[in-house]
Amino acid sequence: MSGYRIVHYMNQFFGGIGGEESAGIKPESRSGAVGPGMAFSKALQGKAEIVGTVICGDGYFAENMDEAVEEVLRLIGEFKPDAVITGPAFNAGRYGTACGSVADAVGKKLKLPVVSGMYQENPGVDLYRKSVIIIPTSDNARGIKDAVPAMTNILLKLLSGEALGDPRTEGYLERGIRVNTFHPRSGAERAVDMLVLKMRGEKFETEYPMPVFDRVAPADPIKDLKGAKIALLTDGGIVPTGNPDRIEASSATKYATYSFEGVRSATSDLYQTAHGGYDPTYANQNPNRVLPLDVLRDMEDEGVFAKLHETWYTTVGNGTPVANGKKFGSEIGAQLKKDGVDAVILTST
Amino acid sequence: MIQKTASHVICVTNNPDWGPGRDGFEYVDGGPWGVFKRARDLVHGGWRFLAHPLYGNFNPMRHPYRTLLLESPSGGDRSVDMESFSMLEAALESCRAGMAKNYGGESGEAARRDFAKLDCELMRDALNRYCLWAPVIS
Amino acid sequence: MRLELHRARVKGIRWGSATALAGDGVLQVNRDELLALIREDGRFAGVDADLASPGDRVRIVPVKDVVEPRCKIEGDGEVFPGMIGDVETVGQGKTFVLDGAAVVTCGKIVGFQEGIIDMSGVGAEYTPYSVTFNLVLIFRPVDGIEIYEYEQACRLAGLKAALYLARSAHESGAAADRVETFELPSVPELLSAYPKLPRVAYLYQLQTQGLLHDTYVYGLDAKRLIATIIHPNETMDGAIVSGNCVSSCDKNSTFTHQNNPVISALYARHGVDLNFVGVIISNENVTLIDKRRSSAYAVKLARILGIEGLVISEEGFGNPDADLIMNCHRAEIAGIRTVLITDEYAGRDGASQSLADATKEADAVVSCGNANMIVELPKMDRVIGYTDYVDVIAGGFSGSLRADGSIEVELQAITGATCELGFTRMGAKTL
């Protein structure tokens, strides 16, 4: 028993409770280190100690984010820690989002040093990198042996009050925030230095990496709406009751397609929302609010457009990695073209 | 207004200093955000900017007025001008980054009058070039 | 063209019976004589003058321009050609400089164009004018005057005062502590002198958008210019003058035009690892057609000169970002390598997009800092000017000016803090 008191947050799997079938468990705490916490304990030996572990199911967290964060924070607080570790989550999307969310709250509300670890492409990174120190890890749990020393190293620096240097030297993911600094030389001198190197074909480093804009040219507007076939899509997570295709509440790995045939309105007996990123009350009361089938049927009757495409597509746009978004979009778009659809209404939240 | 070319030019503004009922002027209520939204609708319909939608040196949210100069699509071609579209997105992004200023109180009112004047000054040259008459600043 | 800058070091400033540089390096100023000169312009209802030295617990606000006292001692023309005197070409011969002194003009023109100069404390670290001995002129306009008349009066007053100080000091026998020589011959001579060194030019963007956003070249409103060539020495004699003070952090004051650091940095490397062929000035107008015309023209001039590398500096932010990116893109497509100097508006948290435009060819950028960074300026003992409008200055916000006199404001409000000529050592990095 020595040094700093650390609490470790993890999910149901690493907590040894179970796999996906246990993803719905509510936050609970354990004394001391659990699972991967043991490796951290060893690395922290002499300087810090894992006094407690807080575990929460990834599914529960994704579907009840506000309550989950509040409860997790409360449980963490009970241990009176000096710092917190969350994850590492590797490439597990819901886990990464939960780790980022907990770390963000710990930093802002408990005002404690906190580190997290996850794979570069984990959706939790883009969501929380600005406010959380995230150490990059491999994409699977075998990377634990490198993740632990890397995370421990930074955690100890934060605890000692040492200012963290820049991300590349220190080994954490770039947070994407611009911070002012004084250079030894004036901007003009730095510019001429840079130009000389650039003209020689030598290596130089820009002080401001240009953002890359992935621009998609919009399609031409419809000239003849009355003759058009319109399709309805949503990433607001509306699904048939029971979510038969099990679209995840966050970090969705899939989209699904269903038929509108014979349906005039997205009523609550037929549909529900699976989206974990907003209060589901109003969407569940009347799913037309997110998937406006009723209005479109009326417009179809009135002849505003020719036909509502019978097939509709849905996914949950909550922490979806950009790569998945692109993939879904291209596949759905190709199919819609084949089906002779002229235009799409895509609802979101 | 006499039509000189296949397309026509309008000025979208929320600045009352231009004076009411001017030919070629479209008046929008609300702050700069409202003016940008109207411009966005036009740009999506194929209109293009003749003057850059951002000021030099003011974040749009720090300035109560905005005057924009746009040209209609000519002929039947209503495809989106990508340059105008990019500029508009940059302007909207800039709105999001800036914090809205509150022009309360007497000094706020004096500043508001100054901003209205300056908006006219900064756009006067451009409007004259496209034959949308600008008032004499008094 | 060959120009010698005769720099006399100023080590203090005080009021005195005659305007001269005393033996101890202190600039003495005859206040009455100076004010009489400025008051000749009937557009002022009141002119006042004050002094501020480095380390004083003094705040100067609202700052319009800063000018370095200089005068010609040999060679054609006079400093600030086309503004006070004739338009004869300058940049040759000898020019006297009161090195370490500055004229700061101050006074409400519109309620939001203030800049702040703190002579001590945190704020002093961010402005280059906390280390100069400043003579501050504070103006009050005549009732009912046209705003652009008043702006012109303020602009000219600063230049007159700067010329007066230098001329009087020189005529009273002030001697230079050091002489810097700047010589750049004609282009054919340059090419035969250094045939193997890469040909480099400086593309100098000038803000030209209207009242309080203008720049003057030999007295000509630069929005009327098409991109053109200027000899670097001409800038040292005040051929380029600022009429631009918004926003204060990244406007090029006349002082920085006179002391352009890109020009000095290129001169320093000339003949060593680059051939400094020349300077191209271009403007930053409001209409897109003007932007395109200026950009096409400027890059064409670079190609005519056979330029291989271009340093491009911006003035301001927002739509001028489009000029910077356009110039970069055109030059790179033409095979000219570029380096850009700009500042950033990345938001208070540093997480927003820093520039309003981008192009993948802009792979070499020097940043002069994020202008949205919040700074806490402590209460000062004395304010020269007015603080009434601090809440509405670009960079200020409701509640900026606190009851105790301290100010919470963005870097944007501090004069010269992120000057995009690369004047200071300020920069930014991504964490």
Image (cartoon, rainbow, N blue to C red):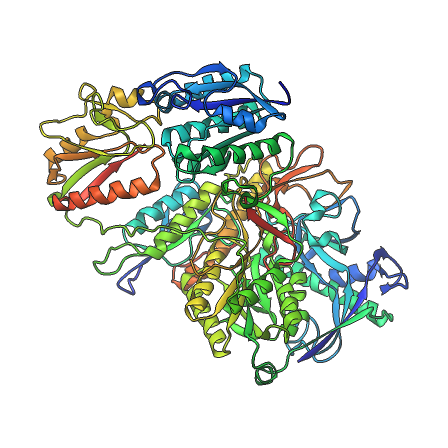
A56 left or right, relative to C192: left
Q: Is residue A316 above or below residue A228?
A: above
Which quarter of the picture shows residue C211? Answer: bottom right
C344 left or right, relative to C241: left
The one of A271 and B103 positioned closer to us in this rendering: A271
The residue sitting at 71% across, 36% down in the picture is C405
Q: Is residue C25 above or below residue C94?
A: above
Which quarter of the picture shows residue A140? Answer: top left
Q: Is residue A88 visible?
A: yes
The one of A200 and B68 positioned closer to us in this rendering: A200
- Image location of residue A22, percent across then percent down: 33, 18
Total marks placed: 0
- Image location of residue C419, percent across then percent down: 61, 56
The one of A228 and A312 positioned closer to us in this rendering: A312
Q: Is residue C118 above or below residue C397?
A: below
Q: Is residue B69 above or below residue C309?
A: above
The one of A205 and B138 positioned closer to us in this rendering: A205
- Image location of residue B85, percent across then percent down: 35, 52
A82 left or right, relative to B130: right
